[in-house]
Image (tube, helix red, strand yellow):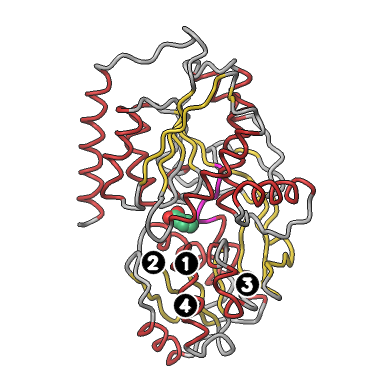
């Protein structure tokens, strides 16, 4: 299905949903301190399942730190497995927004799902907090007062990596990526920085999402003999890619770079194959701050798993919501005041300094990390207070 056809269909579905929902009564508040309904549009199956689970569990961890109440209201979590499938996104979003009448929608992981979601939440004016998907348009062309993002934009995680590669003296790069909006935008951002700094892109290798058959492409890379390879893969696909790259004998010949999703949450599975990989991201396990240490310990205790960047976004989402909802005494109907409270909300994030930009995207440090001895070591800050350019964002007031 072409991108254009897809957007038209999503728009039609959204228009239908809007018409239907305007006939439905809105939930009244505050008749009693009714439970606040938080929608989770996340992947619980497929290649991004671990990401969805970490976001969810970190949100619940943060909620427990507020006695499971937001703005004085108990929480009703309403989860839908979005399967990282953009084609199913309009139906899944409608299920949460129109069917379940959630007060706040959170998620998704996949940028294609986020794009379909944006059409609907813009019309329905549902307060939405994007907890992972990095699609530029969310806080760019499609930015909206009721939409915030606690994760990152594609540009933020990929553009700074160009400088890292160039500083390593590597000028000829091959790009390899899952061929959907995140991969495409991530490559464009890297390419912008890399060519500006005098680098050349030798070849771009798109791979359909969520394919993990990389052999033929890795043979091609070996034949091209570039100085560096910059990639986008995440979750289970990233674990497999890094192992395949080493198995193909490329690890010691052509250094691998990427946005940090390449190793995030999958370092243990990648083992020795990941040694030496440099990435850029707004978080690292090893950030040596009391807040990060406390968060990692609490997450591990609650889930028996290690926290990662996905968990950080979930954790911060609930803390920010708690702070904003406290200011409006839990009244989600007071949307203007709630948005203003979120815009000025601050949280002690495990990632370091955090604030929302005018476009509602995080302004945050982007770190250079390298895998050493099975650990993600922070080499320094690639970009301090990185602010996404928010191209095309015209925020309605
Ligand atoms: C995305 O589709 O935006 C995305 C998915 C996984 C990791 C990072 C970004």
Give the CA separation, mark 2 to mark 3: 19 Å
The x, y position of residue 326, in whole percent, is 63, 20
Q: Secondary structure at mark 2?
A: strand
Magenta residues, start to end: 150-155
Give the CA separation, mark 4 to mark 2: 17 Å
The x, y position of residue 338, in whole percent, is 55, 22
Marks 1 and 4: which is nearer the front? 1
Which mark identifies residue 232? 1
* Residue drawn at 37 percent across, 32 percent down: 122
- Given residues 25 and 117, the one toward you in this image is 25
Which mark identifies residue 178? 2
Q: Are marks 1 and 2 in contact (CB under 8 Å)?
A: yes
Marks 4 and 2: which is nearer the front? 2
Give the CA separation, mark 1 to mark 4: 15 Å
Could you tell which of marks 4 and 2 lies nearer the N-terminus?
A: 2
Could you tell which of marks 2 and 3 lies nearer the N-terminus?
A: 2
Could you tell which of marks 1 and 3 lies nearer the N-terminus?
A: 1
| Left or right, 321 with reference to 119 | right
Q: Are marks 2 and 3 in contact (CB under 8 Å)?
A: no
In the rendered image, which residue does mark 3 sit on?
278
- On whether ligand 1 comes within 8 Å of the CB at mark 1, the answer is yes
* Residue drawn at 45 percent across, 63 percent down: 188
């Amino acid at each position: 299905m072409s991108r254009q056809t897809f957007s038209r269909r999503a728009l039609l579905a959204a228009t239908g949903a809007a018409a239907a929902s305007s006939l439905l009564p809105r939930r009244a508040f505050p008749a009693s301190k009714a439970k606040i309904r938080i929608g989770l549009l996340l992947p619980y199956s497929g290649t991004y399942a671990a990401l969805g689970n970490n976001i969810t569990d970190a949100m619940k961890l943060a909620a427990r730190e507020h006695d499971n109440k937001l703005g004085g209201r108990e929480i009703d979590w309403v989860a839908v497995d979005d399967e990282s499938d953009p084609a199913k996104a309009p139906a899944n979003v409608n299920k949460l927004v129109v069917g379940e009448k959630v007060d706040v929608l959170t998620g998704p992981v996949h940028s294609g799902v986020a794009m379909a979601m944006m059409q609907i939440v813009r019309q329905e004016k549902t307060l939405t907090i994007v907890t992972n998907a990095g699609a530029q348009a969310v806080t760019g062309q499609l930015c909206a007062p009721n939409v915030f993002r606690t994760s990152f934009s594609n540009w933020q995680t990929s553009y700074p990596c160009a400088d890292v590669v160039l500083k390593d003296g590597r000028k000829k790069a091959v790009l390899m990526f899952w061929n959907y909006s995140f991969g495409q935008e991530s490559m464009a951002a890297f390419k912008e920085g890399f060519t500006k700094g005098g680098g050349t892109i030798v070849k771009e290798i798109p791979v359909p999402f969520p394919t993990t058959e990389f052999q033929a492409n890795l043979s091609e890379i070996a034949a091209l003999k570039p100085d560096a390879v910059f990639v986008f893969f995440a979750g289970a696909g990233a674990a497999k890619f890094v192992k395949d790259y080493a198995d193909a004998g490329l690890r010691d010949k052509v250094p691998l770079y990427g946005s940090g999703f390449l190793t995030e949450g999958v370092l243990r599975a990648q083992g020795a194959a990941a040694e030496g990989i440099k990435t850029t991201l707004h978080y690292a396990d090893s950030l040596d701050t009391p807040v990060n240490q406390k968060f990692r310990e609490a997450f591990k205790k609650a889930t028996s798993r290690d926290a990662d960047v996905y968990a950080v976004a979930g954790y911060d989402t609930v803390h920010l919501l708690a702070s904003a909802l406290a200011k409006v005494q839990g009244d989600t109907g007071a949307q203007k005041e709630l948005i203003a409270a979120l815009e000025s909300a601050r949280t002690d994030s495990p990632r370091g300094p955090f604030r929302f930009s005018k476009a509602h995207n995080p302004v945050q440090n982007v770190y250079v990390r390298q895998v050493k001895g099975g650990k993600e070591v922070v080499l320094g800050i690639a970009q301090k207070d990185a602010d996404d350019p928010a191209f095309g964002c015209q925020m309605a007031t």
